[in-house]
Amino acid sequence: MSDILITRDGDVLVFTLNRPDHLNPLSPAMREEMIATLNAEMLNPQARAIVITGAGRGFCTGADLDLSTIMERRPLIETQMMGGINQVIQLLRNIPVPVIAAVNGPAAGAGFGIALAADIMIVADSASFHLSFAKIGASPDGGCVATLCRKIGEARATAMAMLGDKMDAQQAFDLGVAHQMVPTAECLPTAMELAQKLAKGPTTSYGLIKQQVAAAASSSLDDSLRLEASCQYRAFNSQDFAEGVTAFVEKRSPKFQGR
């Protein structure tokens, strides 16, 4: 069976990391399959929402590192990262449809980064988050530090990265890292229900919202207002906006097509 299952449920694209015996570490082949699928979606959109989860009792323990050979690969690490996990993170952030992480168990390292790259995170009450890079003298990757600084503040993000302390599901919810915490058995069903709801929504609008959220951390108010105006222009000229207005006037539920 494949180490990553890529399935479709209607308009929802589902990635299931499928190495449950090891809590789903990401191999290079798994990363390449995610990159290829996400790139194909960018070029020829089919899905209107994406869900990422893990098989078994874990979400993802990060990169599948062979510590016995990693010393030999040190000169290549920067290039490999930019073409590997970093590209996965960038695609998840930039793809113009909602991405939902169903974090069903431990998420560590780059696995934490993937969860943070999602637009909405649903966490099981058994989930936990780990940044253990410093424990082996490494530096965090997967965009974890940058994203955590925005979500929980510089002080907490720094302490978590340096000390390697875990964040449990309750802390993730309380700090605003996760949108919702549910019993473990309900994690994926909750994420899928939300994805199906979003897949029926105004996809163009969601993509524009993602742009504004991504730019907010580094933009001035003036830049944000200019981006808002540009996004609003594009939204107003979408078929979904026309349908939304018509449905409002006709006092019925809109039937968005994602265009």
Image (cartoon, helix red, strand yellow):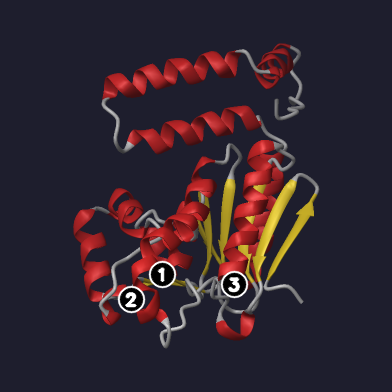
User: Is residue 139 left or right of 170 when viewed as pictured?
Assistant: left
Sequence-first disc among 2 and 1: 1
User: Where's residue 136, x and y in %?
Assistant: 29, 81
User: Where's residue 118, x and y in %?
Assistant: 51, 51
* Residue 155, numbered label: none
Residue placed under numbered mark 1 in the picture: 109
Which residue is at a point 38% across and 55% down the rendered structure image? 143
Residue placed under numbered mark 3 in the picture: 184
Secondary structure at badge 3 equals: helix
Mark 2 nearby-residue class (10 Å; few <14, some 14–19, many ≥20): many
Which residue is at a point 49% across and 52% down the rendered structure image? 87
Residue placed under numbered mark 2 in the picture: 132
User: Is residue 26 left or right of 55 when viewed as pictured?
Assistant: left
State whether residue 73 is above or below residue 153.
below
Secondary structure at badge 1 equals: loop
- Tell me whether circle 3 and circle 2 mark residues in contact (CB < 8 Å): no
- Tell me whether circle 2 and circle 1 mark residues in contact (CB < 8 Å): yes
Q: Nearer the viewer, mark 3 or mark 1?
A: 1
**Badge 1 amino acid:** Gly
As measured in the structure, the alpha-carbon distance from the residue carrying label 3 to the one carrying label 2 is 24 Å
Residue nearest the observer in this picture, 208 or 181:
208
Quarter of the image for residue 158 reads bottom left
Secondary structure at badge 2 equals: loop
Which residue is at a point 40% across and 74% down the rendered structure image? 73
User: Is residue 28 left or right of 196 when viewed as pictured?
Assistant: left
Residue nearest the observer in this picture, 228 or 39:
39
State whether residue 87 is above or below residue 181.
above
Mark 3 nearby-residue class (10 Å; few <14, some 14–19, many ≥20): some
Q: Quadrant of the C terminus?
A: top right
**Badge 3 amino acid:** Thr
**Badge 2 amino acid:** Ser
Q: Is residue 151 at all visible to an observer of this figure? A: yes
